[in-house]
Image (cartoon, rainbow, N blue to C red):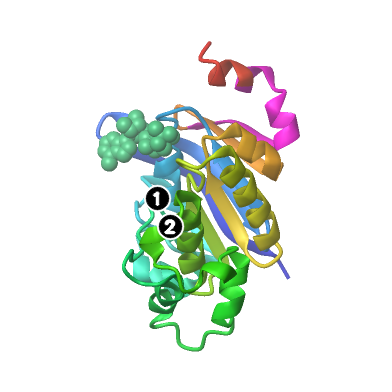
Amino acid sequence: MSDVLLHAENVGIRFGGLQALEALNLTVRDKELCCIIGPNGAGKSTFLNVLTGTLRPTSGSVRFLGRDIAGLPLHRIARLGIARKFQIPSIFPSLSVEDNLKVARWGVPAPVRPLSELLELVALTNRAATLAGELAHGQKQWLEIGMALAIEPRLLLLDEPTAGMTPQETLATAEMLLRLKGEFSIVAVEHDIRFVRALNCETLVLHQGRRLRSGPFHDIETDEMVRDVYLGRR
Ligand SMILES: Nc1ncnc2c1ncn2[C@@H]1O[C@H](COP(=O)(O)OP(=O)(O)OP(=O)(O)O)[C@@H](O)[C@H]1O
């Protein structure tokens, strides 16, 4: 049986006169972790929006477990098993960490994972009773990852999960994702190269809406073209 979860093929999207994405392919397998990187305006968020069905590609297809998901509403996508964490945490600051997770689980027909396990997955066990608004910035981001996991997805999509984090929080987040990889498939869009280096996973480099390079991060990192794009020489 194929272990492919998500398969994007030849994806292109045009906004008026701008070809924002062109001929992009991405395959995510069960329990695989991969990163999408690239300079500002490369098309990372747009590609993530296509992968979650939020934006319908002008060309190409996106299939999740063999089913075309392009343009499906978010709640349908979530029900199919895709969860997304946005860049800005959308937690309930006046509720406790535990209650935030309970709210996120509303509507999940038969949750398998106990709340204690969710708390452990996102390193918030000893903050369960803390009001979410009182958490450190990094912990707020982790809580939101926990809220995304509360719907028991197969695939977790993360948009700049380490935005605004301290170097220590960034490394702790990388360690967390490496642990989560044993249970979920994860796609992370990221700017922070230290974070992507710590993950050392399959990486897709975008530049001007196209694939510049893809492969294991240690190969990507030493690539002349990638270095040029990141250093702004092209
Ligand atoms: N809804 C839209 N309408 C028109 N142009 C758009 C739209 N969304 C994105 N773009 C353009 O598409 C290109 C890719 O943008 P996108 O936000 O995906 O890049 P990015 O790699 O995520 O950048 P950043 O790292 O700065 O967040 C940019 O030129 C952007 O201006």
Which quarter of the rendered picture does the N terminus lie within?
bottom right
Furthest-top residue in view? 233
Position in image of residue 62 (x %, y %): 48, 55
Looking at the rendered structure, the kind of residue marked 1 is: Asn
Tag 2 near tag 1, CB within 8 Å: yes
Secondary structure type for disc 2: loop
Q: Is 13 or 145 nearer to us in this picture?
A: 145
Q: Which residue appears at 39% of the width and 67% of the height?
A: 131
Residue occupied by mark 2: 52
Q: Which residue appears at 50% of the width and 72% of the height?
A: 128
Judge whether 136 appears above or below 13 on screen.
below
* Ligand 1 picture quarter: top left
Judge whether 172 appears above or below 12 on screen.
below
Using the rendered image of the protein, determine whether residue 159 is visible from the camera's viewpoint: yes
Residue 49: numbered disc: 1
Furthest-left residue in view? 16
Q: Is residue 132 left or right of residue 113?
A: left
Judge whether 110 appears above or below 23 on screen.
below
Residue stretch rendered in magenta on the structure: 210-226
Q: Is residue 72 left or right of residue 118?
A: left
Q: Is residue 50 left or right of residue 180?
A: left
Residue 79: numbered disc: none
Using the rendered image of the protein, determine whether residue 21 is visible from the camera's viewpoint: no
- Queried on whether the Cβ of the residue with tag 1 lies below 8 angstroms from ligand 1, the answer reads yes
Measure how far apart labels 2 and 1 are at the Cα level.
Answer: 5 Å
Q: Is 145 or 209 nearer to us in this picture?
A: 145
Looking at the rendered structure, the kind of residue marked 2 is: Thr
